[in-house]
Image: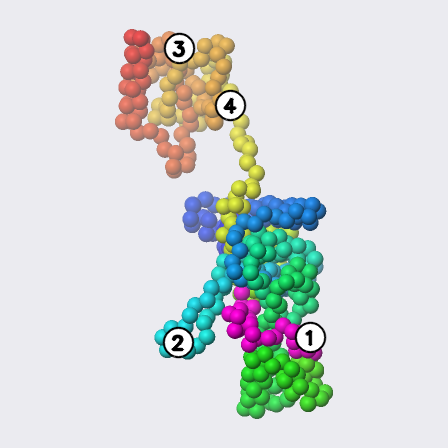
Amino acid sequence: MAVLGATQDSFVAARRVLEKLTMVTVCPNTVRASTEQVGHILAAHAEQVRTTAHATLTPPPVQHPAAPRMYVTMDGVMLHIRQEGWKEAKLGTVSTTTTRPPCGRMAAAAPTVRTTAVSHVATLAEVATFGEYLWVEARRRGVFSAAAVVVLGDGSHWIWNLADQYFPEAVQIVDWYHASTYIWKAAHALFPEGSPLATNWAKHHLDWLWDGQVGAVIASLQTYGTSGAAITSTITYLTEHQGRMHYAEYRARGMQIGSGTIESGCKHVLGARLKQAGMIGDRDGAGAVATVRTWLKRDRWDEAMQLRPQRQRTYHRVARPAEGAVALVNSGATISDVCLVERAPAPGTPEPCSVSTPVVVPVVVPEMAPDLLADGAILSVSPRAAHPWKKAWSPRRQRHEWEQHAQRRQQASAA
């Protein structure tokens, strides 16, 4: 139920899928409770690891060997939280990449860099707490043993503050697509949107930016003076992140320059389940669902199930009636409901512990081997179950059981 509650569009949809898969009907609130219960267990485990790591200065153990180059990305997603309004949920990823050489007619192109082995961290907590969670996940993935670490993000200041605090030796790269967006905004501020002049101006300055000539782009924008807020904001953005825009150097080293990993993570990890049309959730519930989804996405479900506490049995064993007591057959029990013949326990003999004990009823069945009822033997009769999977034995099976029991009694008497 937790898997379906975290992966389907809603708890109602999860309940329908569960019924189709297992023929078991539950209410949506049961699915919600199961999903949130697992999410709270996983969140408590993550909190314990984080607290221990920062209180004792003992880093968590490395569970995965480091790749030669590791990537850390961060971003935020606005979620609608009940009684709080729109709040930003933080999402971080730790990943590696593979390089695929070009082939065919694209042999002259640059190699393609693909993201692999992505793990996510999501929380509605403050930036400082999110940074600690991300540091723990990076430690688990072996980031600090990698030959090179790259932090990718947009222009949000909290991203680079966390990068300086937890990954001081990492190469910081501003996402190419965010940087190019500012160039297009400036082009549309100077020329009519969609006009050839705006397109040619933007492409010319994007070529400079692609080659790492950020200073040339800034100098060109400054010639237009105060031509509008778009020009001013573009100059400010490029000036603040100039040291993170050496795109020609990054590409020469085979590094990613786009934050597609975190952008897609914001959509399929958080947005696809928690940001649908008209969806509003409480803080605890949204955080629990997000936690379950991150563990599912990074393929740690088996580990998550090991963290669940052992469930205690809630059944109560029904005591057998005292020797000589007479119990009436209830619930419409018939001879086809007979499932066991056994001898009444001797006085003072401890009873074996079993999951459930059928109602014991002394009955006489003359047509079915009356000699088996001698010496205090009794019939254990249980009401016919209504569930279609729990059908009574067929007459052939009953006859076979009686014959087997008669043979055992004869062998016991001979011995």
Residue name at image x 39 percent, y 34 percent: 390
* Helix, strand or loop status at disc 2: loop
- Which span is picked out in magenta? 236-261
Is the Cβ of the residue at disc 3 closer than 8 Å to that at disc 2?
no
| 227 w.r.t. 63: above or below | below
- Foreground disc of the pair 4, 2: 2
What amino acid type is highlighted by mark number 1? Glu
* Helix, strand or loop status at disc 4: loop
Disc 3 packing (10 Å; few <14; some 14–19; many ≥20)? some
Cα gap from disc 3 to disc 1, whole angstroms: 94 Å
- Determine which residue is flagged by label 3: 376
- Determine which residue is flagged by label 2: 107
Q: Is residue 237 magenta?
A: yes
- Left or right, 378 with reference to 192: left
Q: Position of residue 403 (x, y in %)?
A: 28, 19
Which label belongs to residue 249?
A: none
Q: Position of residue 333 (x, y in %)?
A: 40, 25
- Foreground disc of the pair 3, 2: 2
- Determine which residue is flagged by label 1: 240
